[in-house]
Amino acid sequence: MYLRAAVTSVLLVVVQLGFADCDCSNPVVRKEWRALSNSEKLAYIDAVKCLQFQPSQLGHVYDGARCRFDDFQATHINNTDYIHWVGFFQPLSGGIALSCLNMSQICGAYAAMRGPNLKSDLNRKSFFNDAWHRYWDWTLDVNTEADFPKSPVFDPVYGFGGNGAYINTTLWANISQHVPGKTGGGCISTGPFANMSVNMGPGANSFSYNPRCLTRDFSPWFATRTLNASVVASALRAPDFYEFDRRVEGGVTIDTGTYHSGGHKGVGGDTGEITDLYSSPGEPVFYLHHANIDRLWDLWQRLDWPSRKYDISGPDTAYAYPFNFYGDKPYRNITLDYQMDFQGLLSTDSQIVAIDDVMDIQGGRLCYTYA
């Protein structure tokens, strides 16, 4: 009944979510960041900025929401305690990236207003819609610790900018788990989001207006240990969804983290925005990370499509069995009929989506694929 805005997932990386079964004969192709042309990368960045320019549609519910981008963060803050370590984490991780605003209308107008500052292509609705479909395959950037900060995702012109200035957080009592190998912590100073305002967070129930800079705190140490091909291969070898999801979500400690937490703490370290369990969608990279989580779920499904197309399981209550990090909790098993509430993020009247409708990215209400 809860939505996880990316986390898991939220999304900017918006895929079109229709509300009738579709003939998916021409799926949108979601591409890895480094496979894009420079103009495509700039189009995506401008699309993110478009959301930061458009007024909030949920500001009457969340005081701190000033723009449409904030709506995703606010909804995630509101649902964080219900959407992690549950059976519907994967559907929502893809789902929020699916949670479609009508970007062709919203950002088409924005592109026209920007005029010559944007490529003329951006005034074409189809191009602007396509600009959203991106993901980050971090396994390509973690062969060594030195490789991670050099990822094209962090390019200062054709990416999201780099790390924040180093801050020594060793003695900070408000950090429950320090991430080894952190290298930053301050405001980012390069790239298109160097002057971005993060308006809510950090922490639980942090809906008040709290404008501040976007921070990053790269931990190449953590990234190389949790985002590598071996970690991904382990998840893909899982025999069923129950085990696959456990291997993706991992545990709640540094030592038990896998690739979900790897994307968060690898980029966010101790103090980066994406590390905060609640307000992490305030970091634009969040959406590329969760799009890749969705891609890997689809890849796992298609390794044995007949038996995995409808394979779903796990608790409806966070941290309940099989996780049990904090002891036994009452729960019910997730089924295909379980309904996810996207709470104002969809562009349709109905905000309810059943898990059954998002199990196949080329069937039901979805129509996209990964390259």
Image (tube, rainbow, N blue to C red):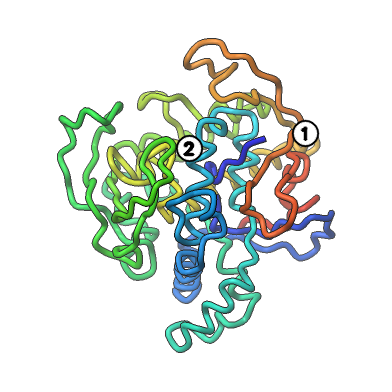
Residue at 39 percent of width and 47 percent of height: 208
How far apart marks 2 and 1 lie (CA) works out to 23 Å
Q: Position of residue 86 (x, y in %)?
A: 60, 28
Dot 2 or dot 1: first in sequence order is: 2
- The residue tagged 2 is 260
Q: Amino acid at mark 1?
A: Leu
Between residues 41 and 189, which one lies in front from this camera angle?
189
| Image quadrant occupied by the N terminus | top right
Percent across and percent down for residue 141 are 38, 50
Which quadrant would residue 224 be assigned to in this image? Answer: top left
Q: Which mark is residue 133?
A: none
Instruction: Tell me the element at label 2.
Output: helix
Q: Residues within 10 Å of mark 2 (few under 14, many from 20)?
A: many
- Of badges 2 and 1, nearer the viewer stands 1
For this orientation, the residue located farthest to the front is: 60
**Mark 1: few, some, or many residues within 10 Å (few <14, many ≥20)?**
some
- Above or below 314: residue 15: below
User: Viewed as shown, does residue 188 lie left or right of 348?
Assistant: left
Residue under circle 1? 336
What residue is rendered at 46% in x and 71% in y?
A: 46
Find residue 133 and report its image quarter: bottom right
What amino acid is labelled 2 in the image?
Answer: His
Q: Determine which quarter of the picture holds residue 31.
A: bottom right
- Residue 253 as seen in the image, left or right of residue 190: right
Looking at the picture, does residue 41 appear above or below residue 265? Answer: below
Q: Is residue 175 left or right of residue 135?
A: left
